[in-house]
Amino acid sequence: MPIVVRIDVELAKRKMSVGEFAERVGLTPANVAVLKNGRAKAVRFSTLEAMCRVLECQPGDLLEWVEEETP
């Protein structure tokens, strides 16, 4: 998938646990895991806004587009 989710990097920078992050954003830890592992098909702007507010970052710090390799 060409969109890479970098939540784990931002959490590590802040030494914040997934549980604390999930609680502050208003998600379940399981849903945070789905996002972190790149299995999410979509993210609501309100969720992205809450994640950026909690982590004090920009959306581009959490999401990165990477060109797919062609065989």
Image: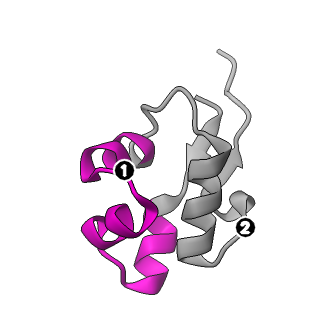
Residue under numbered circle 1 = 32
> Which of the 4 quarters of the picture holds residue 58?
bottom right
Q: What residue range appears in magenta?
A: 8-35
Chain-order first, disc 2 or disc 1: 1
2 on left or right of 11? right
Question: In percent of the image, x 27 and y 53: which residue is there?
Answer: 29
x, y percent for residue 6? 54, 57
**Residue in front for this viewpoint, 22 or 2:** 22
* Vertical position of residue 46 compared to residue 41: above or below: below
10 on left or right of 65? left
Residue under numbered circle 2 = 58
Which amino acid type corresponds to the residue marked 1 in the rendered image?
Answer: Val
Q: Residue furthest bottom?
A: 14
Question: In percent of the image, x 57 and y 30: which residue is there?
Answer: 42
**Residue in front for this viewpoint, 41 or 1:** 41
Which amino acid type corresponds to the residue marked 2 in the rendered image?
Answer: Gln
* Vertical position of residue 64 compared to residue 34: above or below: below
Q: CA distance from mark 2 to mark 1?
A: 18 Å
* Helix, strand or loop status at disc 1: helix
